[in-house]
Amino acid sequence: MDLNTLLKENARTLYLSAKVMPSRQRKIFTVAYLLCRIADTITDIPFLPLKDRIYFIENYPNLVKTQSKELLAKYLALNLKAEQKYEKEIILLENLPLCLDAYASLKEQEKKDILEVVTKVSAAMEWDLNYFADEEPTYLLKAVPGDKETIDYCKHMGGAPGMFWAQLLLNGKENKKFTEEACKIGIALQITNILKDIAADLKIGRIYLPITDLTKYGLMPQDLLEKKNYKLFFPILYKWLHFGLENIAVAPNFLKQIPFYKIFARAAVMWPVLWALETYQAILCSRNLLDIKYRPKFPRKVIYKTMFLTPFFVWSNMIFGYIFNKKFNAIKELLPSK
């Protein structure tokens, strides 16, 4: 299996964004994404004992950096036999050596940038495993302590990859404002994931929203298992949707800093932003976020429509701003004010 196929199988939407990148940037992006995705899979996959998951996440950045044969041998010695439903995850885990080889072939600065994002993402996952540590999570439902933990988690899991993407676009140049705005966009994308995956995370005993929010509205973590409590959950949902919108609002200005002639880089930024807004709207319109069968998603035809129309707006900050603001304001109108 090659890197592009592996990316396509594990990130269909991001794969579309990666396809329009210049070939060198695409390779760097693909290696970084797959290394982070493998760490995420190690964290979440249920058939690996918790102690093994914690051990490998603690040592994962060192494995990537040093290409340690000892660590890799221990990793490959894991029993990756599991039910067929985990076949895709197992294929990804088994291809870690391919990703490490690709990482080793990159230039030193490229490796340094990738290692930085892998380290930050791994730190968030290590916290995740230790905080939610429970071999039988269905018996203990747990929420994070407060706003700080939710925001820090978003910064590590979304903001750090956003800053990595900005550094990739800057190609060695320094631009603090640009990287800060990229971090905000990454945070906005991560809170999107948290909100749309609430029901799935409940199944594994995790709530990435603060317990302080729940108790404020008379809820305890276990109450979210009762789908009838969805309406009580609305104020918490609205709060974090506002948080996401506040962060993603920088996107039009962020795009203005990418030259017009870099049309593929501009498209690779526009698509995730526009699709995140579509997801925000789907979250708001979901019949019940606490019920996994109503997991919010927008129609695939929206993706194809966006791609088809891209040549007509990719070169124009004004047209993109109009499209962005129209979607943004439509969501704001549906949201109660803070």
Image (spheres, rainbow, N blue to C red):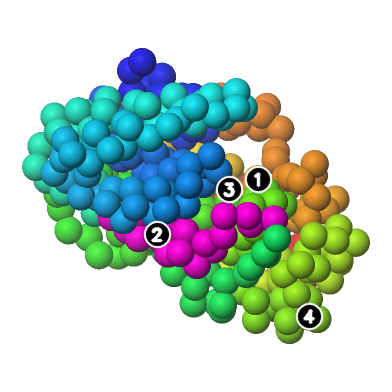
Type of amino acid under label 1: Glu
Residues packed near mark 1 inside 10 Å, few (<14), some (14 to 19) or many (20 plus) = many
Q: Nearer the viewer, residue 170 or 308?
A: 170
Q: Position of residue 235 (x, y in %)?
A: 76, 73
Contact flag, marks 4 and 3 (Cβ < 8 Å): no
Q: How many marks?
A: 4
State the separation of the CA atoms marked 2 and 3: 26 Å
Figure quadrant of residue 78:
top left
Q: Nearer the viewer, residue 114 or 329?
A: 114
Q: Quadrant of the C terminus?
A: bottom right
Q: Nearer the viewer, residue 39 or 332?
A: 39
State the separation of the CA atoms marked 4 and 3: 27 Å
Residue matched to label 2: 126
Residue matched to label 1: 278
Of mark 2 and mark 4, the one earlier in the sequence is 2
- Element under label 2? helix
Residue 33 seen from this side = no
Of mark 4 and mark 1, the one earlier in the sequence is 4
Contact flag, marks 4 and 1 (Cβ < 8 Å): no
Q: Is residue 238 left or right of residue 190?
A: right
Q: Nearer the viewer, mark 1 or mark 2?
A: 2
Residues packed near mark 4 inside 10 Å, few (<14), some (14 to 19) or many (20 plus) = few
Q: Which residues are magenta?
A: 119-138
